[in-house]
Image: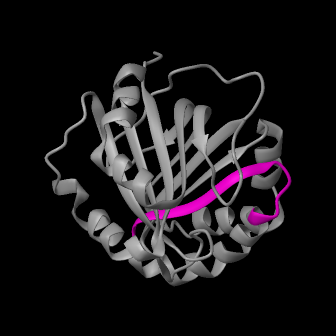
Amino acid sequence: KMSNQVAVMALVNIKPQAKYSGITRLMFNRFSSYRPSGLLLQKHMGSGKNAGFSVNPSGTHQGLFCLFDDLANAAQFLKDSPLLAWYRDHAQELFLVKLRAYSVKGKWSGHQLTESLSTPPSGPIASLTRASIKPLNAISFWSKAPPAEIDLQGTPGCLISAGVGEAPILRQATFTIWESQAAMDSYARSGAHLAAIKAAMQGNYFSESMFVRFQPFDAEGTWKGKQLD
């Protein structure tokens, strides 16, 4: 059954002089009194260096993923959120996009997204992959991840890519936007990424994982100098 769910993804690179204030917000935002209407799931995430694909934390990159019960509440959040207002005032770069899911596998903190449209006939499309990595498998997982992400940076058809996570090392997510389904599928079947995925599945690295594909719309701003038309 289709739902009316709409997600919002924000990617931000905070100005260096506001770095510590940004870290404070990352640590304490969940205690904020602001509660948006229709919010089903919220994940405020930090990032590693190198666009997020690193075990070394970045003090300035953050990601925010919010899932709403409908478009009106998602739009209201973009207008009213104190955190987004702070980002707009203190960002070197800020990218915001709305998302409708069309393929969902797995869960995030026990929550499963529901599909809100059928597979779009053409691009662009977005992908969110997240996993809780079992502590004993972390070293093995991270030995496979960097080659896959280096591949990603130069991959044809990849418009936006960011690595974010709820917790260093063990709870990681990758958000990407592709010009087409074919471009994403081609990367998913490519060398380093395929090797990383196969190793993760065979080694049973994850205690929980989620793979979602979305249709992105109403994007604003840029990420790594790229924008979504």
**Total of numbered circles in the picture?**
0
User: The C terminus lies in which quarter of the figure?
Assistant: top right
Q: Which of the two residues, 154 or 195, is positioned nearer the viewer here?
A: 154
Image: 42 above or below 91: above
Examine the rendered structure and indicate whether residue 18 appears above or below residue 122: below
Residue 5 percent across, percent down from the top left? 42, 25
In the image, the segment drawn in magenta is 153-168
- Residue 105 is one of the magenta-drawn residues: no
Residue 141 appears in the figure = yes
Coordinates of residue 182 in the picture (x, y in percent): 83, 39
Name the residue: 32% across, 41% down. 41
Q: Is residue 221 above or below residue 203?
A: above
Q: For residue 40, which quarter of the picture?
A: top left
Q: Is residue 125 left or right of residue 18?
A: right
In the rendered view, does 123 fall on the left or right side of 93?
Answer: right
Rendering coords of residue 143 (x, y %) = 62, 82
- Choose between 48 and 131: the one closer to the eye: 48
The colour style of the image is one colour
Whether residue 168 can be seen here: no
Most common SS among magenta residues: strand
- Quadrant hosting residue 195: bottom right
Q: Is residue 155 magenta?
A: yes
Residue at the top extreme, as displayed:
1
The picture places residue 157, in percent across and down from the top left corner, at: 82, 48
Q: Give the residue at x 36% y 30%.
A: 68
Point 69% across, 46% down: residue:
227
